[in-house]
Image (cartoon, rainbow, N blue to C red):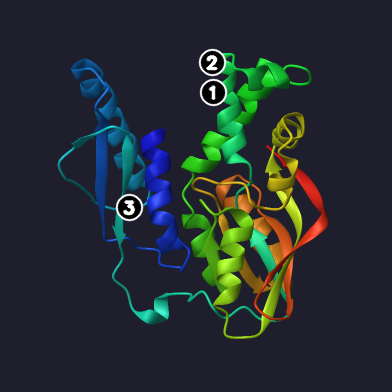
C-alpha cells in the first residue's frame, strides 16, 4: 500500500493539469538504515511492487534506480508526460460563477495517525476510547488507505469532458493551502469560497476529542495523495460528480464556488460537513 500511495501521489501533479498519458516514471527509494538485512530484503521489494502495480493501472513504465540507505524510508519518484499544450488544462482560467469540486475526502493524516496511536496504545488513543472503538478506527483507516492509493486519472479524464477551467491536487499544504496557491495564479480577479468539507468518517470526532478541530475545519490539515480540486462551470459540476461516482465507485463533492475578488480563499466559518465513507 505504501508503494501504491507513493505512485498515486507522484502522478497526481500530472493529472492535475489534465495530462492523461504518462510516458515514464522514475522510482526514488531508500531503505531505513535501522532495517536488518532480512527486513530490507522483504519490505523494499513489497514497496516497489505496490509502486509498479499502481503504475500499471496508469499504463506507465517505471524505471528503478539504485536503492539507497537512509535514516528514513523514502518512496517517491518523478513522472514525465510529453504532450501538446492543447492536451492540457492549464491551472489559471477559473471564471466567476464556476463551482469548485473535490474528488477525495479530507482527513488522511488524522485517520492514519489514529490507527498508529491505537496499535501503540498511546495517550492519544486513550483519549479516543471515550467515544470511538477499535472497529471505528479500523474502518476510518481503511477509507483513508483506499483514498490515498486511488489514482486521480478518472478525475483528470472528466476535467476534459466537463470543460474544467483550473485544478490542483490537494496534498501536504491541505485544502486551504493548495486552493490559496491556485487562486493566486488566476488570470481573472477571483476569490474561491469554500463552504463544504467532505471528511473521512470519524475524523471530525477524532479531531474534537484531541482538540484539533480548528485546523481540520479551516482546511489546513496535512493531506497525503489527496484528490483534485477543480474549478469548472457551475452547470457542469453536478454532472461531473455523478459521472465520477459512476466510473470510480467513489463520491466527488461540490465544495465551493468562484466569485469576483482579489485571488484569495475564503473558508466558511460554519462549513457543511459531509462524512465520507
The answer to whether 198 is drawn above or below residue 102 in the figure is above
Query: Which residue is most to the right?
Result: 270
Point out residue 272 in the picture as x, y percentages from the top left corner.
82, 51
Q: Quadrant of the C terminus?
A: top right
Dot label at residue 79: none
Question: Which residue in the protein does label 2 denote?
Answer: 120
Please indicate, yes or no, whether residue 163 appears anywhere in the rendered image.
Answer: no
- Residue 232 percent coordinates (x, y): 64, 72
The quarter of the picture where residue 199 lies is top right
Residue 30 at x, y = what percent?
25, 37
Query: Which image quarter holds the N terminus?
Result: top left
Which label was assigned to residue 116?
1
Q: Which quadrant of the figure has residue 181?
A: bottom right
Q: Which residue is mark 3?
A: 59
Q: Quadrant of residue 166?
A: bottom right
Residue 14 higher or lower than 184, as above or below: above
- Mark 3 falls on what kind of element? loop
Marker count (numbered): 3
Amino acid at each position: 500500500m505504501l508503494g501504491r500511495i507513493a505512485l498515486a501521489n507522484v502522478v497526481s501533479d500530472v493529472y492535475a493539469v489534465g495530462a492523461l498519458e504518462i510516458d515514464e516514471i522514475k522510482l526514488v527509494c531508500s531503505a531505513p538504515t535501522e532495517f536488518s538485512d532480512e527486513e530490507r530484503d522483504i519490505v523494499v521489494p513489497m514497496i516497489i511492487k505496490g509502486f509498479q502495480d499502481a503504475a500499471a493501472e496508469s499504463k506507465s513504465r517505471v524505471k528503478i534506480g539504485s536503492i539507497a540507505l537512509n535514516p528514513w524510508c523514502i518512496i517517491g519518484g518523478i513522472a514525465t508526460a510529453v504532450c501538446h499544450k492543447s492536451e492540457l488544462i492549464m491551472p489559471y482560467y477559473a471564471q466567476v460563477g464556476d463551482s469548485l469540486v473535490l474528488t477525495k475526502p479530507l482527513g488522511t493524516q488524522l485517520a492514519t495517525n489514529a490507527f498508529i496511536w491505537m496499535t501503540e496504545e498511546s495517550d492519544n488513543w486513550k483519549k479516543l476510547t471515550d467515544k470511538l472503538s477499535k472497529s471505528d478506527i479500523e474502518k476510518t483507516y481503511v477509507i483513508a488507505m483506499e483514498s490515498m492509493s486511488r489514482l486521480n486519472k478518472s478525475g483528470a479524464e472528466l476535467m476534459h469532458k466537463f470543460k474544467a477551467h483550473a485544478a490542483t491536487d490537494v496534498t501536504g499544504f491541505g485544502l486551504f493551502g493548495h486552493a490559496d496557491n491556485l487562486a493566486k495564479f488566476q488570470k481573472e480577479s477571483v476569490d474561491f469560497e469554500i463552504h463544504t468539507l467532505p471528511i473521512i468518517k470519524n475524523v471530525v470526532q477524532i479531531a474534537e476529542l484531541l482538540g484539533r478541530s480548528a485546523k481540520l475545519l479551516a482546511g489546513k490539515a496535512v493531506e497525503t495523495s489527496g484528490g483534485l480540486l477543480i474549478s469548472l462551470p457551475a452547470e457542469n459540476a453536478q454532472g461531473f460528480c455523478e459521472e465520477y461516482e459512476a466510473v470510480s465507485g467513489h463520491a466527488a463533492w461540490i465544495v465551493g464556488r468562484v466569485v469576483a475578488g482579489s485571488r484569495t480563499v475564503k473558508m466558511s466559518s460554519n462549513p457543511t460537513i459531509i462524512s465520507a465513507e
